[in-house]
Amino acid sequence: MKKWKLIVSLVTVVIVAVAMLVLISGKKNGTAAAGESYTFATVERGTVESVVTSSGSLSVVSSVTVLAQMSGRLESVRVDYNDEVNAGQVLATINTDLLRLKARAAQASVDKAQANYDLQALALQNSRTLFGKQMLSEYDLKTSQSALDVRKAELSSARASLEEIETEINQYAIITSPIDGIVLERNIDVGQSVVGGSSAASSSLFTIAEDLARMQIEAGVDELDIGSIKVGQAVRFTVEADTERTYDGTVEQIRLVPETTNNVVYYSVIVLADNSSGKLLPGMTANVEFIKEQKTDVLVVPTAAFRFTPTALTAVEIKRAVFVASLGDMPEEQKATVLARFDEAQKAMAASGTDAEKSTSGLSSLMGGGMPGGPGGMPGGPGAMGGSGRTAGSGQSAAGGTGTGTGAAGAGAAGATARVAASKTLWYLDESGQLAVKLVQAGASDDTTTEIIGAEDLEGTKIIVKLQVK
């Protein structure tokens, strides 16, 4: 029995050891460990947009507020909300009973003034006759003329008063629409008293929109994004009432006076939109996207793919893989030389006690064309990694090539550094199922998708987006 227990124990130990070896082998080869899997996305052609988001409220492009031109009590209101009106159409009338009484009194004043004027004109004619017969002095003649001028002025004043009252009756008491449009607001009812428009207490009677076939949005854009907004720029927006439908618009105006809210500076941007469907109503909230850039038929990948970092590789292995990818189409012999120098630089940093996984100083020195000798330096002294240095007595550079060869390698390494700094990484599994990396240039991007440039050979490739733990 003890013998069987011993055999079972040995078998168990062997199984555990084999499992650990498989796990370690998987990590070393860059494959996902047990219980882990990769989520892939295919590099394919599509459309990507770069946008600036904002929000605002819809309003009519042009509207007119109608005020009363005189005070009084409303006798009739002839239109209601949403009624279409024409220019000159009667909207409401003000009671004119008192005005008509005033008009009668004013007419009587005109008649009286006319009679006085006619009498004085006859007196002046008589005075001129007497003056011609030298029976009246010149002073009396001029006095009679002046009296007639006074009567004439009185008649003109009486007529003006009558005309003012008649204007109020025939015009001001009748409130008409100044434009063709639609009634948005009606703030009055029959019997209500209104105050003339010249008074500070006057209020709006009607608001008439000129045209509801076009609407405008006043959106606030913060100072960080306002530089991306141009007049004539295409705009896309939705409204809360119908989030499934997208409307188009155009930037009409960028107002230069800023507004500050919670220490954030905003600029008002006016967007014009077509409303021939009549679905857009004043006051609706619009979620706006200003289209900065739009590209079609370009290679795109999920933006999350750029954030993936393999856990199956150490930081040094990742750095080496990215460096190899940066060498691109460099000749194999030169690529081997540069890679050998890279590996030696990593070993040198490790020998000097530098954390090769975190420090980039050694790699920066490598890219600069050389690495000092001495403690922590490359074997062979200052020229070991230089463009033309040679090791003493050998006639060969430390990297195993001639001085000219290592100079080309240094230049290639410097170019690789520039490519790494300006590129992003995409990881995928090669034909043998091992992790591989490709350096690409990122182009236009939105929240989820990014254009990639200079990677036509990746079209159709399944790239790794994330590591998924089962």
Image: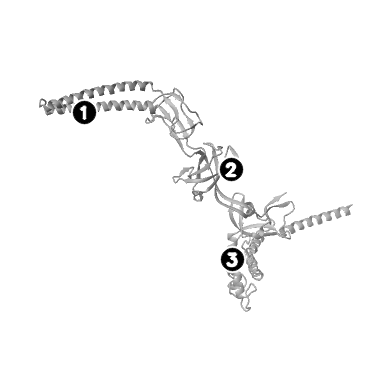
Q: Which of the marked residues, 3 or 1, is nearer the chain's N terminus?
A: 1
Q: Residue 448: x percent and y percent? A: 62, 49
Front residue of this view, candidates 208 and 216: 208
Kind of residue sitting beneath label 1: Asp
Q: Residues within 10 Å of mark 1 (few under 14, many from 20)?
A: some
Q: Which residue is mark 2?
A: 246
Q: Residue 361: x percent and y percent? A: 58, 63
Kind of residue sitting beneath label 3: Gly
Q: Residue 345: x percent and y percent? A: 62, 66
In the rendered structure, find residue 41 and report the number of the disc placed on it: none
Q: Which residue is mark 1?
A: 149
Answer yes or no: do the residues labelled 2 and 1 have beta carbons within 8 Å?
no
State the SS at label 1.
Answer: helix
Q: Which residue is mark 3?
A: 415
Q: Which residue sits at x=28%, y=22%?
A: 111
Kind of residue sitting beneath label 2: Thr
State the SS at label 3.
Answer: helix
Does residue 66 appear left or right of residue 301 in this picture? Answer: left
Residues at marks 3 and 2, CA–CA distance in whole angstroms: 46 Å
Which label lies toward us, 3 or 2? 2
Q: Which of the marked residues, 2 or 1, is nearer the chain's N terminus?
A: 1
